[in-house]
Image: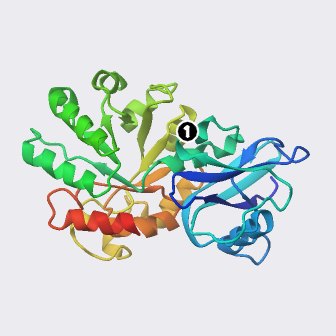
Amino acid sequence: MRARDHIALGVVYNAARDKVLVAKRPRHSHLGGMWEFPGGKVRGGETLLQALKRELFEELNIDAGDCSPLISFDYDYPGKPLRFSVWKVYGWTGQLRGNEGQTTQWVDISSLAATDFPAANKGIITACKLPAVYLITPDLDSYSPAFMNELRKYLAAGVKLVQFRSKSAHNHKPAVMEMIDACRSYGAELIVNSTPEFAMETGAGGVHLTGERLLGLTGRPLPSGSRVGASCHNMRELMHAVEIDVDFCVLSQVRKKGSAATGGAGGQAADYTDDTLGWDGFSELVRQVPVPVYALGGMRLSDLANAASHGAQGIALISDVWGRPGSVARINRALSR
């Protein structure tokens, strides 16, 4: 098999961060006439960031400012194996123009899926729409007004995606409906870790599949307007999730259970066992799937940057937030970086 070409792409945001820049590929090129995120091939001796900044200047006459990782993955076109490293680009400077004669356009993030992109871009588009923090609720006997108040504080602090996780979700339908309303009032989404039917019955934003439910499906369980997430623990589950067209995965365990509560440093050996992936193991798996993947297992809000550097969409977490003093302030700090 031929060596993979490494491609650095930039999702360039406008000042309001509600639109991104796309360019039309020349007709004579591979996948000509389709829209793309700007960037190009990494040259020998270049870092990914050096390649991205060079390509943005050469193609668009802009100097990239603040750049942070968005998603990295391998993708195989017929006879053309590629490795994509995609970055969010904010605060660029320069007089924007298509230096190669290409048409450019600012597109609302919410409308990206309707644009004619190459197949490899599907996961990038989804990643643009997903937040960095995926908050999972604890499994409780009941969800009291105090719990609802705590949830609203986290939503006000900037949480945009919440998973309701309960082994008896159907017994908590009134609470789920209240959570859905709370999330909507803050422009957030609640998805349920239950059956697709329960998600549709409650009007939730989507469904989160357990590993067992995931492997029992042969196709996407909800239409494209609803979110579908999946819990995965190995490559088999990740590949099946891609096959049935999920929007994102959650991969665990990165650290051992309970390590988030210890307050220890993320790299300490005590956080890892033979049953955990570690960041290197996590990175190796997510690189092979073209969909956004959240890291789960001992995650802390302070892990966001480290997770992104290892290819994660962000982090999924429970114990580092619920019922812990100062959680609202820590969410604010984490999401403002």
Q: Nearer the viewer, residue 107 or 212?
A: 107
* Residue at image location 15% in from the left, 27% down from the top: 171
On screen, residue 138 above or below 327: above
* Residue at image location 54% in from the left, 54% down from the top: 286
Residue 228 locus on image (x, y percent): 44, 35
Residue 6 locus on image (x, y percent): 73, 62
Residue 203 locus on image (x, y percent): 32, 26
Give the left or right position of residue 183, taking residue 323 as reference.
Answer: right
Residue 58 locus on image (x, y percent): 80, 68
User: Which residue sits furthest front?
Assistant: 95
Give the left or right position of residue 38, taking residue 164 as reference.
Answer: right
Residue carrying label 1: 242
Q: Nearer the viewer, residue 245 or 37?
A: 37
* Residue at image location 27% in from the left, 67% down from the top: 330
Q: Nearer the viewer, residue 48 or 284?
A: 48
Q: Which quadrant would the C terminus be assigned to in this image? A: bottom left
User: Which secondary structure, mark 1?
Assistant: helix
Task: Estimate how packed mark 1 is, as few (under 14), some (14 to 19) or many (20 or more) residues with alpha carbons within 10 Å.
Answer: some
Q: Is residue 204 visible?
A: yes
Image colouring? rainbow
Give the left or right position of residue 187, taking residue 43 as reference.
Answer: left
Q: Is residue 259 visible?
A: no
How many badges with numbers are in the image? 1
User: Which residue sits furthest right?
Assistant: 28
Q: Quadrant of residue 82?
A: bottom right
Q: Amino acid at mark 1?
A: Val
